[in-house]
Image (cartoon, rainbow, N blue to C red):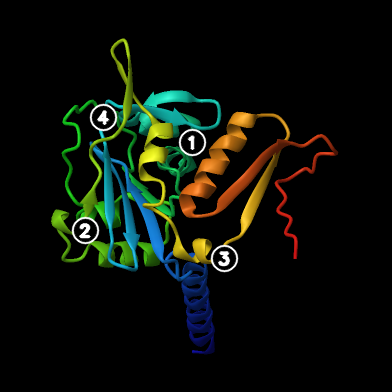
Amino acid sequence: MKKRHIISFIGVIGLIYLVYCSVRTSVFIRNQNRVNMVFYEKTSVFYSFGQDNVNYAVPFSSQMEFMVPGGYGYYKVGALGKLVSLERKPDLFRRAFSVNTSSFVDIYFYPRSPIVYYDSSGSSYDLPTMSDIFLSSTNGSFLDRLFVWYYFLNKNKTQFQVITDLPTKKEMQRVIFDKEEFFKLYQGYFYKKSYRKEKNTVQLLYTKSFKTAELISQLLEGEGIRVVDISLRDTSVPRTCTLSQNT
């Protein structure tokens, strides 16, 4: 009898620990005033939910090419899942959509089995279903899935400001997403008000690639953090990325 009680006690402690970890790591517990998420599917969609009930949806055609950071160059959106599978780096979903929308993607969902999408239906899309939320792979916890389900509960397309006229560049038969033009057109749409209220400014010091620093700059600006300078660091290089604050 005592052994059964001990096993039950250990089970309860384990459950409490799992709940604690789920709550501690949840992107929705951080009290953000805007949450960004991506559903990777036939027509991949970037969603941005605001506490002010101003919500955006940005659908990406599977045949459109966009930049995948990390030296991968340009990939068709519909082929990104295959690249993720080959590289075994699911975080490429977050990094790719973050860079191209100039905003931080908090959570992403994608099929459990790698698939290449060839559909060319453009901006036609459907809102995520319960099975899309609870049965797809994700970087979020079960608690995050519950929050996402709540976000989409009783919502329809009319409750989103849909951005379908995406700027593109055409090269031969290729249609390439123009992320620089998108940044110019929609900067401020996905701001986090808390960052704007801080009114802090940032200087970026890079060691090798100005292009990488520029990408980071656009991400920060897209979130509402003002970057006032990008400079080459000519002193000793730290092993990791370092944040210094003048207080």
Q: CA distance from mark 3 to mark 1?
A: 38 Å
Q: Earlier in the sequence, mark 4 or mark 3?
A: 4
The residue singled out by tag 2 in the image is 130
The vertical placement of 127 against 73, above or below, is below
Point out the tag, 1 or 4, that comes first from the N-terminus.
Answer: 1
Distance between mark 1 and mark 4 Cα atoms: 18 Å
Query: Residue at 23% of width from left, 61% of height from top?
Result: 152
Give the label on residue 88, or none: 1
Disc 3 target residue: 198
110 or 170, nearer to the observer = 170
Horizontal arrangement in the rendering, residue 242 relative to residue 181 (left or right): right
Quadrant assignment for the C terminus: bottom right
Around disc 2, counting alpha carbons within 10 Å, would you say few (fewer than 14), some (14 to 19), or many (20 or more)?
A: some
Marks 4/3 in contact by CB < 8 Å: the verdict is no
Against 176, residue 19 (above or below) is below
Separation (CA) of disc 3 from disc 2 = 37 Å
* For marks 2 and 1 on the same chain, the one whose residue lies earlier in the sequence: 1
- Amino acid at circle 3: Glu
Query: Alpha-carbon distance for marks 2 and 4?
Result: 21 Å
